[in-house]
Amino acid sequence: MLWVKTLHLFFVISWFAGLFYLPRLFVYHADTRDEAGHARFVVMERRLFIMTSIGAIGTVVFGVWLMLGWWWPAPLWLHVKLGLVALLLIYHMLCYKLMLDFRNGRNTKSARFYRLLNELPALLLISVLIMVVVKPF
């Protein structure tokens, strides 16, 4: 099980690296006015989203594998953690939608919006860590 946990943590770290950096690319992309810059950000965002998605898939796969050893009903902290992971998956898909908006020239949000959006995964990460390490319930 330690190998599964190690792989789970590896994919969590990979996923969050992308969740932290993709909205930062959106900040810079929102301020870009030239076509060459736009094209460059479209490629960077697409490639980063692919790697981020691999991290998300690995996180979920190895997380489910880790849960196979739990006796049900699961403790409340695990339910809360899974709810937070669901929010992270929704955030991930929101980033996908925003990436497509940029690609298709439909972005209507400011760089400030993306700076604020960039804080959300950090808040969710600290909440997940509290659930896993402290187990407050």
Image: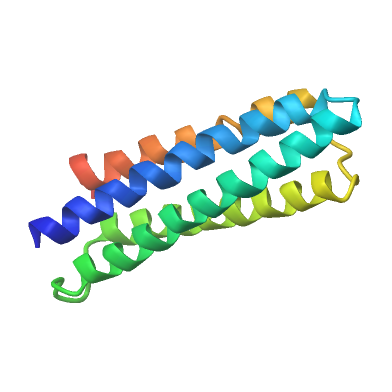
What colour scheme governs how the chains and residues are painted in the rendered image of this protein?
rainbow
114 vs 73: above or below: above
Task: Give how far across and how far down residue 17 sits, in percent.
Answer: 45, 37
Task: Give how far across and how far down residue 123 sits, in percent.
Answer: 47, 34
Task: Give how far across and how far down residue 102 sits, in percent.
Answer: 81, 44
- Which sits in the foreground, 31 or 118? 31
How many marks can you see?
0
Q: Residue at x 46, y 33 (%)?
A: 122
Q: Is residue 87 left or right of residue 133?
A: right
Question: On the rendered image, what quadrant is the N terminus found in?
Answer: bottom left
Q: Quadrant of residue 43?
A: top right
14 vs 85: above or below: above
Q: Residue at x 74, y 42 (%)?
A: 42
Q: Does the image show residue 74? A: no
33 vs 5: above or below: above
Q: Is residue 91 left or right of residue 82?
A: right
Q: Quadrant of residue 93?
A: bottom right
Q: Residue at x 87, y 51 (%)?
A: 104
Q: Does the image show residue 38? A: yes
Seen from this angle, which residue lies furthest left?
A: 2
- Which sits in the foreground, 82 or 40? 40
Task: Give how far across and how far down residue 124 sits, in percent.
Answer: 45, 41
Seen from this angle, which residue lies furthest front?
A: 36
Q: Residue at x 90, y 46 (%)?
A: 106
- Which sits in the foreground, 110 or 49? 49
